Image: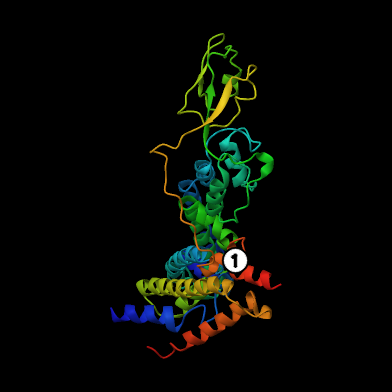
Amino acid sequence: MLDFIIQQPIIAALVALAGLGVIFGALLGFAAEKFKLEGDPVIDQIDELLPQTQCGQCGFPGCRPYAESIAAGDAINKCPPGGQSTINSIASLLDVPAPELDQEHGQEAEVKSVAYIREDECIGCTKCIQACPVDAILGAAKLMHTVIVDECTGCDLCVEPCPVDCIDMIPVDTGIKQWQWPTPPLPNGLIATDRINSTEPPQGGSSHEDAA
Amino acid sequence: MQEVAVILVSSVLINNYVLVQFLGLCPFMGVSKKLESAIGMSAATTFVLTLTAMVSYVVNKAVLIPLNLEYLRTISFIMVIAAVVQFTKMFIEKTSPLLYRVLGVFLPLITTNCAVLGVALQNAAKPLSFAHASLYGFGAGAGFSLVLILFSAMRERLAAADIPQPFEGAAIAMITAGLMSLAFMGFGGLV
């Protein structure tokens, strides 16, 4: 059989190439099974960077759907609770330029705040419980409600439905645990490649304007 | 041991695939804008080159030569390369999805990187042992990585440098590559 194949150059070529194709195909099929992907891992990484307030201000029902949408190519500046720092970290993750926060979806809160229910005024309507995306409000019908401060993400969604306006957003005091050293201001244009990325003109720009 | 050193020096510096033999210029120009993606591309290409050198050696010695089919080298090596690149693509997609995103279209394009086919064909034309052939492939990959990383580091600086307007972008990159090539020609006759 082998002798016959070697004597017939055309059959030899066909057999050799087809055989190689079958072998590589089988190996690749095996590798595809072995390295099978379960979902897009980038979605998980984006989801981890989002603040998990589940507030829906981006127009999606929660952080995970927004992460999926970003992975599919949506804009990354629709998350007011995360603010500029979240935009920057997603931008560096995906290797894209970082845009400003889209004001259409809300403004970045100056300080983190949590909801507080003035319990004397609460009528026990449970409307805020239904609005809360993270189940941070405890209570039952006709009984007063209260907010679990550790669970509250400060998303404001419970303020609107309250019929007696007894929910306040109170800023969280900076305690010894949250306080951080303020970041020292970076000298603009110290590194050459930063100069093209920064939106502000380098330091030489102002003197030029004065001359004009 | 001496042979190993000679093969490495010759494939990395003297016969550098990009700057001396002018093979694999497409990723050299395409993926050298950022140092990070250049490093990822270098690793992927080195992996593909080494694996291709090994597999094509086996295909050449075990299939093509016994059947007197040396004239089918190009097409069968291309098949080997395509399979190896596909495997690398799956591997990177699984292990480093970010690198996969950054490399984008250039990852499947390793298939058409002439340096890869060049290594396979040159290995087949030389009487090398399996170990030396794989080492040659690895050396070619290391040489490619060396110049790609050096070049991308230079381009990052060029992006911020004050360049006359007609020379901006691709023009200054070409000039830089030419100067690097001249410098690498200087290694000729080292061994």
Q: Extreme front residue here?
A: A210
Residue B134 point in image, percent of width and height: 39, 71
- Coloration mode: rainbow
Q: Please state which of residues B70 and B141 is positioned toward the viewer in this rendering.
A: B141
What residue appears at the point 46 percent right and 71 percent down from the top-left corner?
B145
Residue A137 point in image, percent of width and height: 52, 21
Using the image, determine if residue B80 lies above or below residue A34. Answer: below
Left or right position of B161 against B95: right
Secondary element at tag 1: helix
Binning the other alpha carbons within 10 Å of mark 1 as few (below 14), some (14 to 19) or many (20 upward) gives: some
Q: Please state which of residues A184 and B53 is positioned toward the viewer in this rendering.
A: A184
Q: Which amino acid does label 1 sit on?
A: Ile
What residue appears at the point 53 percent right and 45 percent down from the top-left corner?
A46
Q: Extreme top residue here?
A: A142
Using the image, determine if residue B51 lies above or below residue A106. Answer: below
Q: Quadrant of the C terminus of chain A?
A: bottom right
Q: Extreme left residue here?
A: B1
Residue A165 point in image, percent of width and height: 62, 20
Q: Extreme bottom residue here?
A: B189
Q: Please state which of residues B186 and B14 is positioned toward the viewer in this rendering.
A: B186
Q: Which residue is tagged 1?
A: A196
Q: In which quarter of the image is residue B28?
A: bottom right
Query: How many discs mark residues in the rendered view?
Result: 1
| Residue A12 visible | no
What residue appears at the point 61 percent right and 28 percent down from the top-left corner?
A157
Using the image, determine if residue A52 lies above or below residue B141. Answer: above
| Residue B75 visible | yes
Residue A121 point in image, percent of width and height: 57, 14
Q: Please state which of residues A211 and B30 is positioned toward the viewer in this rendering.
A: A211
Q: Which chain carries label 1?
A: A
Left or right position of B52 against A77: left
